[in-house]
Image (cartoon, rainbow, N blue to C red):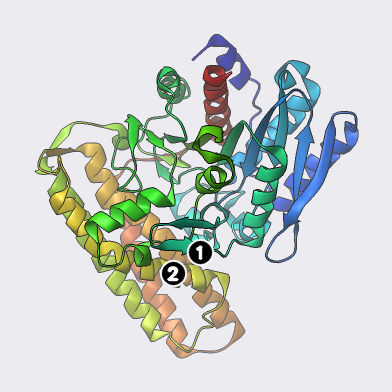
Amino acid sequence: MSDRILAELGRVPRYERFLGVDELLAAVRGAAARHPELARLRDVGRSSDGEPIPMLTIDGGPRAALLVGCPHPNEPIGAMLVRFLTDALLERPELRRGWTWHLIPCVDPDGTRLNEGWFRGPFTLRNYARHFYRPWSEEQVEWTFPVRYEQFAWTAPLPETRALMRAFEETRPDFVYSLHNSGFGGVYYYLSKPLAAGYEALHRLPRALGLVLSLGEPEMPWAVEWAPAVYRYPSVRDAYDYHARYAPDAPAARIAGGGSSLDYLLSIRGAGGAPMMLIAELPYFQSPEISDRTPVAESKREVILCGIERARAMLDVLSGILADVSGAVAPDTRLMRAFSSFIRHQVNTLDSTCRWVHEADGMGRPATVAERVDAWYIRTFYRVLMASMLGRALGASISGQHSPAVARAQARLTRWLDTWLTDVEAHVRYEATPIRTLVQAQYGAMLAVLEQTA
């Protein structure tokens, strides 16, 4: 990582909280109004609830970069990067040189508003879970692009996805940065093209900022690793091929949602014309154990199978609670749709995961501390986040009507959430990552990749 990049990271201000949607959009609109000679702000579409989705364009050169904030609504780090870059690009001509920048501050304003309860802190696992919302794949901007592959087809892009499709088609970007982040663990990346000369910089960046790489299992078993913590950009094609191998009876039925942004760009530009695409997954809560490659007593197969049994036990509890409130809670709210889809998909893919564990190469070697922590505790935490959405839905139902059955279900769920979170807290050391550090890491990853692709 160059001295230039390190100097740039020092310009990122200290942030004590994440900006809400209204604050973010007001700041970007104000900056554009102050610099009409450089900036153009226009709507590329509207959200499912009818909110405008603006895109800021800052002129600077023949190559085009497109940054997308909040592709998942629980991921506001990228929105803070867009806020920082808006001022930086408008005020510093050297940053614009050679590139025209297209910045979408928040592509999912409806969902992001449902996360604003934790944006001001306190930044703890429990407060994050309490106010968490993430739509399941069928309602995610990133995973509802139209696509056809083998026996799988998706033809129902969301309004937000159509807005992003329009942005892709209008800007024809050379570089796309979908501003995601993880929740718990360490840093990892996705790239649409191999970039061997850039891997060292992507590894050095977290160390320079006091962060660790995520060296447990990849979040998707079909992920292709190009270097430690660096993976090929996700595609529905990879998911389909994985399920076709380990669940050949109905691979398409095990896929949630549609195509990724890469799938769509490949469809309109072809493999030779696809841009460099980057995702930097950054943890709100960091655990040093996620980078510990010390061998443990269990094999990798044993560790993952134990994680599957932990998942099965959680899913049994949650399925029972969901059955108890069937008919008493409106099923078609955002929170209930997200939770119900999560349950269905998790249950639907357990068999292919088990077959993968038994058949894939390398499962007999000793597992590492990172792999065990990932399989047993970090994935438990992610399932807690999904379960917390059921808790939010039950709480909203109770406030609107008196239902003893729903109240009992909520009390039962609250006890289980406390049990699961206590288990995670007892076995995993973690600390909240400062917001400035998260923005610096996301900024630095972009600069490192652009440095190698210029």
Q: In the rendered image, which residue does mark 2 sit on?
A: 341
* Rendered position, 454 above or below 344: above
- Residue at the (53%, 60%) spot, across then down: 133
Q: Is residue 204 left or right of residue 449?
A: left
How much space separates mark 2 and mark 1, taking CA atoms? 8 Å
The local secondary structure at tag 1 comes to helix
Q: Check disc 1: other Cα within 10 Å, few if <14, some if 14-19, many if 20+.
A: many
Q: Examine the image and state in which quarter residue 140 appears.
A: bottom right
The amino acid beneath tag 1 is Glu
Q: Which residue is mark 1?
A: 138
How far across and down, in percent of the image, does residue 210 sit? Answer: 44, 25
Residue 162, above or below 433: below
Give x and y (percent) for residue 19.
68, 46
- Which of the 4 quarters of the picture holds residue 62? top right
Q: Is residue 190 visible?
A: yes
**Disc 2 and disc 1 in contact, CB within 8 angstroms:** yes
Which percent across, then down, holds residue 75? 55, 47
Q: Which mark is on residue 322? A: none
Q: Quadrant of residue 79?
A: top right
Q: Residue at x 26, y 63 (%)?
A: 350
The relative height of residue 312 versus residue 19 in the rendered view (above or below) is: below
Between residue 266 and residue 24, name the one nearer to us: 266
Rendered location of residue 419, percent (x, y): 31, 63
Label 2 neighbourhood size at 10 Å, few (<14), some (14-19), many (20+)?
some
Which quarter of the rendered picture does the C terminus lie within? top right
* Type of the residue with mark 2: Ser
Name the front one of labels 2 and 1: 1
Q: Is residue 40 left or right of residue 107?
A: right
